[in-house]
Image (spheres, rainbow, N blue to C red):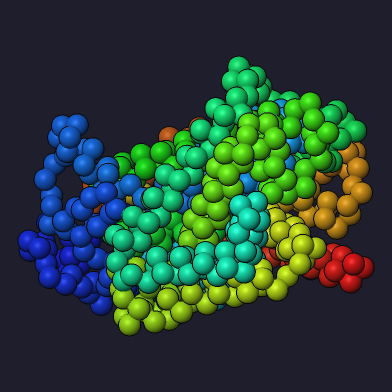
Amino acid sequence: MTNVMLDPKVPTAATVPTAPAAPVAPAKSAVLDDAHVGDIKGALGTIRLDDTTPRHGLSARLKTLLAIVGPGLIVMVGDNDAGAFSTYGQAGQNYGTQLLWTLLLLVPVLYVNQEMVLRLGAVTGVGHARLILERFGKFWGAFSVIDLFLLNALTLVTEFIGVTMAAGYLGLPKVLSVVLAAAIIIASAFTGSFQRFERVAITLCVGSLLLVPIYFMVHPKTSQLAHDFVTPQMPGGAGQLAAVMMVIISIVGTTVAPWQLFFQQSYVIDKRITPRFMKYEKVDLWIGIAIVIIGAAALIGLTAAAFAGTDGFGQFSDTAAVAKGIEDKAGHLAGVLFAIALLDASIIGAFAVSLSTAYAIGDVFGIKHSLHRGVKGAKGFYAVYAGLVAVAATITLLSNGYTQGLITQFVQVLAGVLLPSATVFLLLLCNDRAVLGPWANGPRTNAFTSTVVGVLVMLSLILTASVVWPGISSDAILWIMGSCGMVGVLVAGYFFTAGRTGTKEDPIDRTGREDWRMPPLETLSQPAMSTARKVGMGALRAYLLIAMVMVIIKVVQTALNH
């Protein structure tokens, strides 16, 4: 399939006449929604579909980048949401800056995962959930949508919990704040204009930079932060390994979330980005990663400085208490800015999570799904989006503090359980040459991503075990880590002896890939199911089933005991 080129009937920048009034994807195109074909109308610029002018010179390249910026920036900043504020606040308040190094380790993980989905989006024109359905069957397709819907619905509740925390600190009524936030989230998407939505989203991304002035108001020691950012350490010694590991896993879970994969792939498609602009989209992704890491580091650092030497150090409760601690350290203005930043993060997180769900359901069920369409042109898409937001807001208003804490815990664990499977499917899709052709993964990307999957599985096992057995010991955690390490060595040894190591030269012909797009889905041959793949898929299914059952039982037991 590596030599398959574009169907001549599919509109491209070279074949579509100037300024088409209403570009339409033909029946045989892999693009599932004809609204996904046309001019790129970004928040900061527009690129015409018929614009094939080479980008020479700094000015032309900068204008192109400004038009492309959006998907990578929004998905990354959206991940620094209410849950992230809580997790990073806990890390800073309980352990100072000693866990900053985890952020540095997550940079390559973030880039590799998100680069793969942006590649899938630009090359295929088909959303993540639909590709899973078509390439792995109805079971995994249904599973991907159902678990995404459940996880995203609960994640949305945590975003509205963040709204209530911020509103409470600012002295605003809880009900009015939640209703107003829900109205803003829904109204911003209901404009019928992709460009207007992206302008709102990027404005909120800029709002996330409020953490920077707060950082300087609290004034933590920059030299200490720089040292801890590059120096791995485990605070508290072996006696606190279990508690520290839980925080580390929470940082991983809140920074690398399953919804990100579905969101970025569909958003790239909805923005009409093609492989021609891949380099610019990668720069967009790096901008987003830089902002999210700087924001996370600032949040950990300023929280650590705010509680250092106080009775509150090591006693994290929630983000409202963090805001009060910042006020005590740097004044009321700093606390207000923190609350506003939390409110901003909660809303942009809700934007991204709701959209990823609506996109996935539209993909799988054939519902028209694009922000380029008005409400009348995509009723089902907007109904899913608005319905999810409304339900999450209602649950938040009806729940009490204990229930909200239980939901937050369940979201954290569920994301940890589902993340390894999401990464496995991402890796398999990016090795499917019928889907990506000359854009398929090379050996080095596969070697790195396989290592990441192994680490995620290990962390997922530890997280699941800690929820089921809250008193898990440090020895048990070390045993899990050692066992996973041994399995990893055996698997690596198998691939080494089979001659499949990452040291092999890239066997894929990459020439002409800027013009290569995935052929229509119905024309693709189904991937071969080798014995190894069947065993692996069966093991993954068994792991997910057992982990989900154990977590649900534990959550129900906790609720009943309360």
Q: Is residue 262 above or below residue 455?
A: below
Question: Quadrant location of the N terminus?
Answer: bottom left
Query: Which residue is outermost to the top?
Result: 223
Among the 4 quarters of the image, the one containing residue 191:
bottom left
Question: Quadrant location of the C terminus?
Answer: bottom right
Total numbered badges shown on the rendered structure: 0
Q: Residue at x 66, y 37 (%)?
A: 326
Among the 4 quarters of the image, the one containing residue 449:
top right
Residue 39, percent from left and from top: 20, 60
Q: Residue at x 83, y 33 (%)?
A: 311
Residue 451, percent from left and from top: 61, 41
Residue 216, percent from left and from top: 55, 27
Please indicate, yes or no, whether residue 480 appears anywhere in the rendered image: yes
Q: Residue at x 39, y 82 (%)?
A: 379
Query: Which residue is outermost to the left?
Result: 18
Q: Which of 411 and 37 lies nearest the eye of the viewer? A: 411
Q: Which of 308 and 532 lies nearest the eye of the viewer? A: 308
Q: Residue at x 24, y 57 (%)?
A: 40
In the image, taking residue 105 as reference, residue 276 lies left or right, namely left
Q: Which of 522 and 104 lies nearest the eye of the viewer? A: 104
Q: Is residue 376 above or below residue 191?
A: below
In the image, taking residue 208 as reference, residue 92 lies left or right, namely right
Among the 4 quarters of the image, the one containing residue 122:
bottom left
Please indicate, yes or no, whether residue 262 appears anywhere in the rendered image: no
Q: Which of 36 and 189 lies nearest the eye of the viewer? A: 189
Residue 287, percent from left and from top: 41, 38
Q: Is residue 430 above or below residue 335?
A: below
